[in-house]
Image: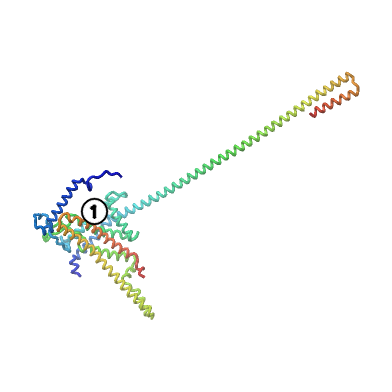
Amino acid sequence: MWAALEALGFNTPVFLAQLINFIILFGLLYLVAYKPIMRILDGRSQKVRESMEQTEHIKQQAERAEAEVARQIEAAGKEGQELVARAARTGEEIKKQAQQEARQEGEALIARARAEIQHERDEAIGELREEFAGLTIMAAEKVVERSLDKKAHRELIDRVLEESDVLKRG
Amino acid sequence: MSEPKKKGCLGCSFPLVIIIGIVFLGLVVLAVVGGAIGRELFGDLGLSFLEIDKPHPELPPEVVFQIFGFPITNSIVGAWFTIVFLVVFSWAVSRRLKLIPGRLQSAFEYILGSLYDFCQSVAGEVNGRRFFPLVATIFLFVAFNAWLSLIPGFGSYEVLNPEGHHMHLFRGANTDFNLPLALAFVSFFMVLFFGLKTMGFRYLELYVNFRQFVKGLGQLVRGKLKAGLSGVFLGVIDLVVGGLEFLSHLIRIVSLTLRLFGNMTAGEILLLVTAFLIPWLFALPFYGLELLVGFLQALIFAGLTLVFLTMATAGHGEEAH
């Protein structure tokens, strides 16, 4: 067994030397290769993760902003509609009021006119009556002057009165 | 895609290709005639400058010099060469690592990153990280031992040793039986270490497990004959299985060592023999082959170590019950 190993080249000092070589290489590579490379790989993946998170964050923010804008637009639209509706309503009210006022005014005007007409008519009737009374008196004077008989006198007065009644009623 | 129609072949104009082909053929013919085979067939045709000494490979490495009586063999010097190369290269790159890598750093990161991913894909996230330095060191050491020893002149550089003999200063460290053996021992002890660290002394139960045996004995003493006998029987089986498990771990050392040593030594001898039989061009394809073999052996050694480590820490003690 031992002889076979030696024939293959086994040699305890050389074996130990190669073992130590490996351990030295392990130590040195750990210092100059693995540690820095792990650090940089970890750093990079961290960075990638961070930037992805940041991207996600920004995306969310953008979405939120977009939603906000949409909401505001909608609100503004609603407000505008409301304004228009209110304006229309106000216009309608104003129109109605104006109509009513106009009607009232018209009615008042008509009433006043009517009252005035009535008044003028009454006045005219009054004047007419005065005139008629004057006429009657004149007629009576004339009759008196002509010395009518009593019966004719009466007929005359009745007729005048009847006529004046007709006048008053008309 | 409208590429302009290429004239010629392999990016050269036809006359150039033909000239290269003729030179190539001439070299092959010259090499065949002048090499060992040609000399046997045609006798000496005055091409003695092509002669190469008949290779006489020796398995034990040669002692180049001694430090305080400690023999330094050419394979140790070869290993130092690899160590210096790897450490200097790594240091040159890692001295100024940047988040956005340059070309050299990209290559460096690619090599180590692939090894790291390999470790994590086999052993998982956490264990992959723990095993990575060991596995990567084994891979890099074996691979670069193999590749650097393929540099022309590496194996033929000679010095005078203290006794006045001509000695090869460098020798591919993988072809020294001691290096694969040392790596296999490292692998074995690291498996043991990580096994113990992860599972505590329960890990040893894998190899020496008296529990079932003692339980069976206890049942026998208490007079439960049937249960006791079967318990003892199962206990004996457990002990035998443990022994086999232990034996398989020892055999791993042997197989790891001999696989690497055999492949690399055979490769070295193959190159020497092809260069001896037909000098110059004939050895070229075998160089390519040896590049591949060096990579594969490194991957196999590192990969097997990784798998053993993973098995040792995966807690398959529970699976057995």
Q: Amino acid at mark 1?
A: Val
Where residue B251 appears, x then y in whole percent? 26, 68
Residue B24 lies left or right of residue A31; in this view the side is: left
Quadrant of residue B236 in the image? bottom left
For the C terminus of chain B, the image quarter is bottom left
Q: Is residue B202 above or below residue A35?
A: below
Residue A46 lies left or right of residue A10; in this view the side is: right
Residue A63 in sight in this render: yes
In-front residue for pair B125/B32 = B32
Residue farthest to the right?
A150
Residue B176 lies left or right of residue B136; in this view the side is: left
Q: Residue at x 72, y 30 (%)?
A: A114
Where residue B26 appears, x then y in whole percent? 14, 51
- Count of all numbered marks drawn on residues in the image: 1
The colour scheme used to paint the residues is rainbow
Residue B160 in sight in this render: no
Quadrant of residue A163 in the image? top right
Where residue B50 appears, x then y in whole percent? 12, 55
Which residue position is annotated with label 1?
B88
Where residue A26 appears, x then y in whole percent? 26, 59
Q: Which chain does tag 1 point to? A: B
In-front residue for pair B89/B298 = B298
Quadrant of residue A14 in the image? bottom left
Q: For mark 1, does the 10 Å Cα neighbourhood hold few (<14), some (14 to 19), or many (20 or more) residues?
A: some
Label 1: element kind = helix
For the N terminus of chain B, the image quarter is top left
Q: Is residue B146 above or below residue B252?
A: above
In-front residue for pair A70/B15 = B15
